[in-house]
Image (spheres, rainbow, N blue to C red):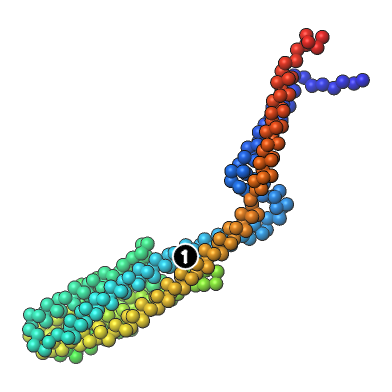
Amino acid sequence: MTVQSIGDQARAFAMQAASNRIKTTLATLTAELSSGEVADLGARLQGNTQDLAGIEARLAMLTQFKSNAAEAAAHTQGMQNALTSVQSINEDIGQGLYLEPEATTEGLMAARSAEAASAFQAVIGHLNGTVGQRFLFSGAHSDTRPLASADTILTALTAQVAGLTTAGDVAQAVSDWFDAAPGTGGFADTAYHGGPGGQSTPIGEETTITLTTTALSPAIRDSLKGLATAAMLDRGALAGNGTEARTLLQGAGKALLQNSPRLVAEMSRLGYAQQVIATAQTEGNAASATLQTARNTLREADPMATAAAISDAETKLQTLYSVIGRLSQLKLVNYL
């Protein structure tokens, strides 16, 4: 009879390899039980990982859409807040100018004009606001401040109205400068430094948001026009002509009040954009939750089966240690 045996050192290596193998299995099973996910997805899915890859790709896309929607929501809210402030300023200044009594003194008219100049500067500040280091009313050029300073604009207008002696001529000169086409040296060239509006941003799988409002939009430009017209008295226009000065202020106030509905319409467009963004965010969150559930189903480890496998591995390890202990007690003298 042939007896096959291995030496003590070889047996020790064999026992150590078996121990390491069981310990590795035990560590893997413990990790699966704690994380709830299987360690070997390929074996779990029998090599068919196409569905899981598709789910992961769609989740990554939805994550990007979620980021775009959050950025668009913050941007539109910032624009809405700015226009709300501009609307409030226009109404206050417009009513004060338009409803001023006929017997207003030159000193009071000068104060009203200075107030309009201060309001003009405040409006410029609101329109030059930022959210997340992006300018709100610069259109596609969101990294560029949309408007020049109030002083720069009023200085350019002062040159336009120099020498004019009637309220109608001053108001017309200011209006022509604000409405001048690009390339003719008016507001679009001297004061506005942003880009065109209308750039689309995807915020959902089938939803994009397009913001067309910029500081060059007619409703915003007309608000600036009305305030700048009233501020011309503070810059020396119509000096010494109280009747024409009063006419100019009242005309500027009337223009501001008449522009109020257009500003409200601009705010309504932003409000609709905000509604679209909120809907896209809700739909995206629901789709993400569904896909995450499907992904977890494919990747999850059965806790009962995993616990049973851990118990089996512990038993094997204990048995191996018992065998090693028994073998370590064998002596040649006892064998003889």
How far from the left and from the top, in percent, is residue 34? 59, 43
In the rendered view, tell whether residue 118 sits above or below residue 28.
below
Q: Nearer the viewer, residue 319 or 295?
A: 319
Helix, strand, or loop for circle 1?
A: helix
Tag 1: amino acid: Asn
Question: Image quarter for residue 51?
Answer: bottom right
Please give the name of the residue rendered at 36% of the width and 77% of the height, measured from the top-left corner.
267
Please give the name of the residue rendered at 18% of the width and 86% of the height, measured from the top-left corner.
98
In the rendered view, tell whether residue 320 sits above or below residue 159.
above
Please give the residue where the numbered disc 1 appears in the rendered image.
68
How far from the left and from the top, in percent, is residue 260? 29, 82
Task: Tell me: 279 left or right of 184.
Answer: right
Question: Image quarter for residue 298?
Answer: bottom right
How far from the left and from the top, in percent, is residue 21? 69, 34
Please give the name of the residue rendered at 67% of the width and 43% of the height, measured from the top-left corner.
306
Query: Is residue 155 visible in the rendered structure shown here?
Result: no
Query: Is residue 317 visible in the rendered structure shown here?
Result: yes
Q: Nearer the viewer, residue 142 or 307?
A: 307
